[in-house]
Image: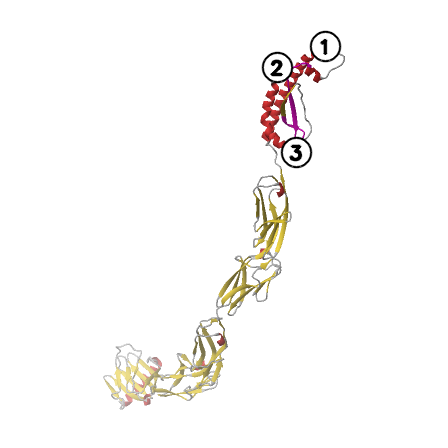
């Protein structure tokens, strides 16, 4: 029967090799020591198995022949057979369980399969050791070693979350358990970990903080507040910083300055503290230092006491004058203005190189005005004003007033001149002073003696200059009448002449009638022509004498007729056509004023010569 059984097994085995190979799902199984593993078949339960055999390295583990199975010693209590599918579970694994496993199954058909089992010690106790705790950039190298329990271990290094790989400075030795980095940089530092794996487990070490000391570098100095210039009496804070690990120590460098630390405050600074300031950073691990670029602190006082001064208190046209702009405190620039506008120097105006002196060479009256000088520095600016009055003159002197005036009229003469300050005036008449300190000369009632040369002299007591102007004034006799009066007189004269002519004609006719008997007597007995006087005497009648005087103006026109009544025995008419003597002109003018109203009476008297009236 044993032989039969062996033959059956061999037959089934060969049939499985031919027909049922690969009945196991996994070709290779890994499991840890103390763990378990299931060898799973591809059969779908339930399957009616009549025969089954599991072996390990060609040694039986369990045999099933319906209806019973046989377990090899050493596997009892460690295995479980799943008869519905032929799968097998192996527990309490040890390293000795590693090897080749096969299965032979006889059901409706024969099946065989094989797989490999690898048993590993699990990863545990992963640790890192370091050789150089203090690292200096570019000067140091370090080595990290990783150790772990387990079998078939693989080692991986992590810096943070990144894997460290080999390079020209990075070496991995001892199967990757040792990490060496030479000439470390700051970028090498970080949290290093060792990760250990095998086919059945893995483990990671605690982190090791690898610190690389470097610096100082990028040392800089900052000022607060940030200004180009600081006002005298203000406060300034200085802060020094540097890139360094560990943090650098700072030392302050400057004239009359001592101190340490990253911050320095200058209180109530003054101009004596103007200068360069810098700081030095020192790393006591790298033993390196670096000095910052110097920062220049300029301390200025505020400008005060601005003024504009002139070289003279009384500027005179034609002279040279300097206006000087001054102030207390540091002055950076000056700006001149005139009458509210920026000053543009002309040909005879110059500014010195600093702009502090404005020169006029020579001075003109147009330079008068309001000058201002603005003095500036980066802290503040002030302004000073100066009123420049250019004294000039007198010039353009003239006298206004009549050149002719009637006697007994009021004479007013006004003298004017361009002058700063105003000129004083003196009046002369024919070299004789008649008035002073007045621009207006007035004579209420003029006389003929007021005719002559009037001289006005203008004097400027600042410029010490004078000017004179002469006006010749003639005082004359006014005409006796106005034009209306003369026209009335002419009309009256014409009327009187007409009346007188009529009267003369009447007298002539009357005389002719009186002479007719006389002529007749002469024709009868007289021997010679008698005179008119004899005729008038022989007539023995009273005749009124009328004397007619005609005055003429200088232009030859008759302006006055005068009648005189004389008690006489004859009548005579006189006509005066000659000009009166020049010395008696005034007397004639006065006589005309008195005689004009009598002309009518005289004419009436002439009319009375007519005996018929």
| Quarter holding residue 515 | top right
Task: Name above or below for residue 414 compared with residue 140.
Answer: above
Whether residue 180 is visible? no
Q: Which residue is mark 2?
A: 611
Q: Which residue is mark 1?
A: 521
The number of numbered discs placed on residues in the rendered structure image is: 3
Q: CA distance from mark 3 to mark 1?
A: 50 Å
Q: Residues within 10 Å of mark 2 (few under 14, many from 20)?
A: few
Q: Which residue is mark 3?
A: 584
Secondary structure of the residue carrying tag 2 is: loop
Horizontal side of 59 relative to 322 (left or right) equals left
Q: Residues within 10 Å of mark 3 (few under 14, many from 20)?
A: few
Q: Position of residue 123 (x, y in %)?
A: 34, 86
User: Measuring 75% from the left and 11% from the top, which residue is drawn there?
Assistant: 526
**Which circle's residue, 3 or 1, is located before the other in the chain?**
1
Horizontal side of 432 relative to 9 (left or right) equals right
Secondary structure of the residue carrying tag 3 is: helix
Q: Start and end of the magenta stretch?
A: 538-561
């Amino acid at each position: 029967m044993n032989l039969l059984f062996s033959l059956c097994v061999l037959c089934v085995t060969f049939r499985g090799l031919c027909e049922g190979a690969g009945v196991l799902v996994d070709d290779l199984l890994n499991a840890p020591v103390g763990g378990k593993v299931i060898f799973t078949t591809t059969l779908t339960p339930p399957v009616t198995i009549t025969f089954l055999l599991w072996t390990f390295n060609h040694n039986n583990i369990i045999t099933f022949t319906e209806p019973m199975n046989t377990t090899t010693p050493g596997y009892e209590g460690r295995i479980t057979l799943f008869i519905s599918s032929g799968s097998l579970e192996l527990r309490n694994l040890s390293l000795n369980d590693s090897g080749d496993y096969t299965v032979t199954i006889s059901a409706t058909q024969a099946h065989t399969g094989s797989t490999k089992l690898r048993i590993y010690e699990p990863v545990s106790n992963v640790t890192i050791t370091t050789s150089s705790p203090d690292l200096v950039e570019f000067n140091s190298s370090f080595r990290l070693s990783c150790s772990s329990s387990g079998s078939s271990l693989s080692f991986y290094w992590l810096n943070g979350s990144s894997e460290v790989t080999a390079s020209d400075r990075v070496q991995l030795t001892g199967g990757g358990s040792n990490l060496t980095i030479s000439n470390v940089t700051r970028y090498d530092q970080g949290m290093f970990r060792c990760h250990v794996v095998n086919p059945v487990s893995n483990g990671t070490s605690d982190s090791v903080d690898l610190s690389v000391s470097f610096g100082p570098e990028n040392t800089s100095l900052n000022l607060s507040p940030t200004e180009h210039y600081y006002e005298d009496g203000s406060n300034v804070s200085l802060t020094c910083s540097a890139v360094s690990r560990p943090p650098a120590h700072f030392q302050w460098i400057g004239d009359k300055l001592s101190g340490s630390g990253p911050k320095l405050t200058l209180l109530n600074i003054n101009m004596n503290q103007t200068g360069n300031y810098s700081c030095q950073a020192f790393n006591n691990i790298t033993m390196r230092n670096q000095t910052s670029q110097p920062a220049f602190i300029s301390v200025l006082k505020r400008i005060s006491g601005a003024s504009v001064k002139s070289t003279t208190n009384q500027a005179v046209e034609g002279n040279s004058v300097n206006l000087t702009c001054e102030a207390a405190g540091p002055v950076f620039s000056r700006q001149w203005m005139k009458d509210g506008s920026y000053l543009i120097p002309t040909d005879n105006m110059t500014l010195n190189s600093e702009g502090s002196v404005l020169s006029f060479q020579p001075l003109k009256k147009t330079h008068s005005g309001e000058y201002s000088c603005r003095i500036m520095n980066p802290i503040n600016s002030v302004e000073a004003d100066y009123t420049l009055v250019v004294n000039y003159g007198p010039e353009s002197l003239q006298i206004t007033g009549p050149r002719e005036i009637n006697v007994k009229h009021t004479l007013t003469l006004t003298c004017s001149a361009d002058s700063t300050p105003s000129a004083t005036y003196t009046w002369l008449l024919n070299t004789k002073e008649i008035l002073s300190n007045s621009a207006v000369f007035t004579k209420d009632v003029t006389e003929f003696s007021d005719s002559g040369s009037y001289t006005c002299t203008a004097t400027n007591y600042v410029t010490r200059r004078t000017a004179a102007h002469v006006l010749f004034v003639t005082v004359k006799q006014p005409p006796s009448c106005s034009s209306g009066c003369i026209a009335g007189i002419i009309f009256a004269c014409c009327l009187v002449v007409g009346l007188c002519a009529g009267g003369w004609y009447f007298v002539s006719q009357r005389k002719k009638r009186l002479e007719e008997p006389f002529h007749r007597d002469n024709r009868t007995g007289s021997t010679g022509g008698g005179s008119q006087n004899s005729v008038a005497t022989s007539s023995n009648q009273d005749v009124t004498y009328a004397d007619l005087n005609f005055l003429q103006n200088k232009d030859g026109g008759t302006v006055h007729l005068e009648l005189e009544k004389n008690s006489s025995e004859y009548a005579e008419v006189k006509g005066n056509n000659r000009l009166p003597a020049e010395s008696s002109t005034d007397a004639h003018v006065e006589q005309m004023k008195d005689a004009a109203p009598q002309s009518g009476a005289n004419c009436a008297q002439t009319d009375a010569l007519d005996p018929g009236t």
